[in-house]
Image (cartoon, rainbow, N blue to C red):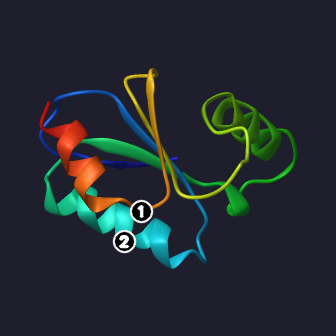
Amino acid sequence: MEHFTGKPSMKVMLYALSTCGWCKKTIELLKQQNIEFDYQYVDLLEGKEQDDAMTIMEKFNPRGSFPTLIIDDTRCIVGFNEKEIIGVLRE
């Protein structure tokens, strides 16, 4: 798991793929907004670690698609939607 230290405001977790352009755009957007967040490249995990990450992610996003952004363990944004992401982070 990777961590970006920015302005702490809420718990933000991103599940991403290392080869996904939309995932990289989401990471850059969060950094530009100076939001503290954690992220995990699920494709770089192995075995049980990867299974556990997918299980957690699929509770919020049953399709298992990327990027999946989970905010405060209650809100989920699937895909790169800049307006929605910025809107939620400013609430």
Q: Nearer the viewer, residue 45 or 25?
A: 25
Q: Residue 49's image quarter?
A: top right
> Is 16 displayed left or right of 2 in the figure?
right
Q: Are marks 1 and 2 in contact (CB under 8 Å)?
A: yes
Q: Nearer the viewer, residue 50 or 15?
A: 15
| Vertical comparison of 73 with 50: above or below | above
What amino acid is at disc 2?
Lys
> Is 86 displayed left or right of 19 in the figure?
left
Q: Residue 91's image quarter?
A: top left
Task: Please tell me the numbered disc located at residue 63.
Answer: none
Q: Position of residue 83 (x, y in %)?
A: 23, 56
> Is 65 displayed left or right of 33 in the figure?
right
Q: Residue 80's image quarter?
A: bottom left
What amino acid is at disc 1?
Phe
Mark 2 closeness class: few <14, some 14–19, many ≥20 residues within 10 Å: some
Residue appearing at x 43%, y 71% in the figure: 24
- The residue that disc 1 covers is 80
Q: Position of residue 14 (x, y in %)?
A: 47, 47
Residue appearing at x 24%, y 38% in the figure: 88
- The residue that disc 2 covers is 25
Mark 1 closeness class: few <14, some 14–19, many ≥20 residues within 10 Å: many
Residue appearing at x 87%, y 47% in the figure: 47
Q: CA distance from mark 1 to mark 2?
A: 7 Å
Q: Position of residue 71 (x, y in %)?
A: 38, 31
Label 1 vs 2, first from the N-terminus: 2
| Vertical comparison of 85 with 62: above or below | below
Residue appearing at x 77%, y 46% in the figure: 50
- Helix, strand or loop under label 1: loop
